[in-house]
Amino acid sequence: MAQLGGTPILILKEGTERRKGREAQSGNIAAAKAVAESVRTTLGPKGMDKMIVDSMGDVTITNDGVTILKEMDIEHPAAKMMVEVAETQDDEVGDGTTTAVIFAGELLKGAEELIDQEIHPTVIAKGYKMASNKSKEILKDLAKDVSVDDRELLKKIAMTAIAGRGSEDKGNIAGLCVDATISVAEESDGELRCDTDKISVIKKVGGKVDDSELIEGMIIDKERVHSRMPKKIENAKISLLNDAIEVEKTEVSAEIQIKSPEQMQAFLDEEDKMLKEMVNKITSVGVNVLFCQKGIDDLAQHYLAKEGVLATRRVKKSDMEKLSRAIGAKTVTNIKDLSEKDLGKAGLVEERKVSGDSLIFVEKCKNPKSVSILLRGATDHVVNELERGVHDSLRVVGTVLEDGKFLPGGGAPETELSLRLREYASTVGGREQLAIESFAKALEVTPITLAENTGLDPIDVLVEMRSSHEKGNKSYGLDIYTGKAKDMLEEGVIEPLRIKTQAISAASEVATMILCIDDVISSKGGGPGAGGMPPGGMPPGGMPPGGMGGMGEED
Ligand code: ADP
Ligand code: MG
């Protein structure tokens, strides 16, 4: 801060809060570690659940890392950065969110110890970067190949992702997830792409989890508009219409003077005629099922019912898009333009009651590019948690199909990486060596936490895991049922390679970013968001990196 004739020049607004040096650093690290700590007990299939009650009193019960953190309403800016780790992980892979956050917390814990030994954050950052890059190489070597034909293997991957969510037996659900993902996989430029948004997941409380099913087509959460319409249509010719089957009201308020009953009748007849024409247009091209995104007039409903058409109205836009892919139809925006080539086909369209609600099933579609999963379960909470599990599972299968690579789970890759990184550290030497060693130690948080959450002694587990990896058993991880180290490939506990590479790089990037902040300036009353956290250099009076050393004692 500059000073003129003894008067300090204020460059910040009055009331601005500012924390510098070690104080800022340890505050941020503590907040980030607290976030990691908060999800720690949920890791793994035996992890505990959290019950989160929001300000409206809505209850969420889950052990999904990203869901917990999103629901928690976190305020501290550094803690928010940890939530972002989970969100990025969720966007990129769809699973491994808890792992990523816990690892980032552990990296910061290690960094704190190094800072106490007077190792500068930039050195730690460099060491972490080297370790993260090396980890990717090692993981690539460890990874095994999987192809789209290997359904059993894909099912195991789906099962690992869904383990511990909602219900015990997931074989059935995992199978549905694999089949659904495979049906939406598309090849483009020689690469497989799996857009799991094309899979719609419909939840209906009631029945058992095992009653969940995959529909080779779509389920629309709507019922027929008219009770006289048929409930079931085979060999359906389906029209998707984004136009109202109603008589348009004039935009300007016009007044029509009707002087005699005949005129009134003529007026009504005209409306009637227009609606009838619209219905005729629809049936003339052979439509027997109609999904309308807008409204259908009562009279038109009656005519459609008379013609034996099954129709629904106000179908969601997203459902229309998925329907279009499932049945190969084109959405038409003006009835007048409707022609036979816009129609889609399905072997069966049927309205069925599921737990008292009517749903329309569009099934037996030829080569559908959109499919649906109908999830069942005893209560809302079971079904919601199952849905989160299914989301992870679909994304994980999609990821592994796209990349074609998987790894053993149960802490196996982390243990292997930890050993190999320690070897690598000794070849690097210098202060970076300490940072790489700290990174290696942080990786062991996965097997340690899995052991803790299973009620095992983490030290015993770690020792056993390390010794089996030293003997060359690279895929040995924690068998949560016996507490022993076992071959995870044989146990079928397997995960996509991308879960680990993404978790490691996201966690180490965020940890370094938090580490390298030595000045926090937050404006008063701006709320935690306003203070934001511009990472890196801060212009006013920002501490030059070299000036860090003695900070602690001087304050
Ligand atoms: P995340 O949000 O990180 O995916 P999870 O609660 O899903 O957290 O736990 C994932 C961890 O649990 C991974 O390390 C995975 O390998 C491990 N895991 C999953 N199933 C098993 C199992 N049957 N035995 C041992 N470890 C398992
Ligand atoms: Mg998971």
Image (cartoon, helix red, strand yellow):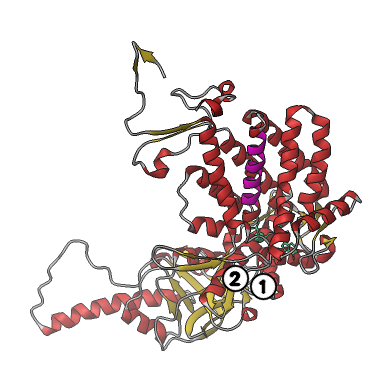
**Upstream in sequence: badge 2 or badge 1:** 1
Q: Is residue 147 visible?
A: yes
The answer to which of 325 and 489 lies nearer the viewer is: 489
Residue at position x 56%, y 50% from top?
34
Q: Is residue 480 above or below residue 471?
A: below
- Residue 2 figure quarter: top left
| Residue occupied by mark 1 | 173
The quadrant holding residue 436 is: top right
Horizontal side of 114 relative to 62 (left or right) equals right
Q: Residues within 10 Å of mark 1 (few under 14, many from 20)?
A: many
Residue named by callout 2: 386
* Residue drawn at (35%, 69%) of the image: 244
Residue toward you, 247 or 81: 81
Q: Quadrant of the N terminus?
A: top left
Farthest-out residue, bottom: 228
* Mark 2: few/some/many CA within 10 Å (<14, 14-19, 20+): many
Is residue 191 at all visible to an observer of this figure?
A: no
Q: Tell whether 511 sits left or right of 530.
A: right
Task: Say which of 362 and 303 sits in front.
Answer: 362
Q: Position of residue 416 (x, y in %)?
A: 81, 48
- The span picked out in magenta is 100-115
Q: What residue is rendered at 14% in x and 83% in y?
A: 262
Residue at image position (53%, 65%) is: 322
Asked if marks 2 and 1 touch (Cβ < 8 Å), the reply is: yes
Q: Quadrant of residue 58?
A: bottom left
Three-letter amino acid code of the residue under disc 2:
Leu
Q: Secondary structure at mark 2?
A: helix
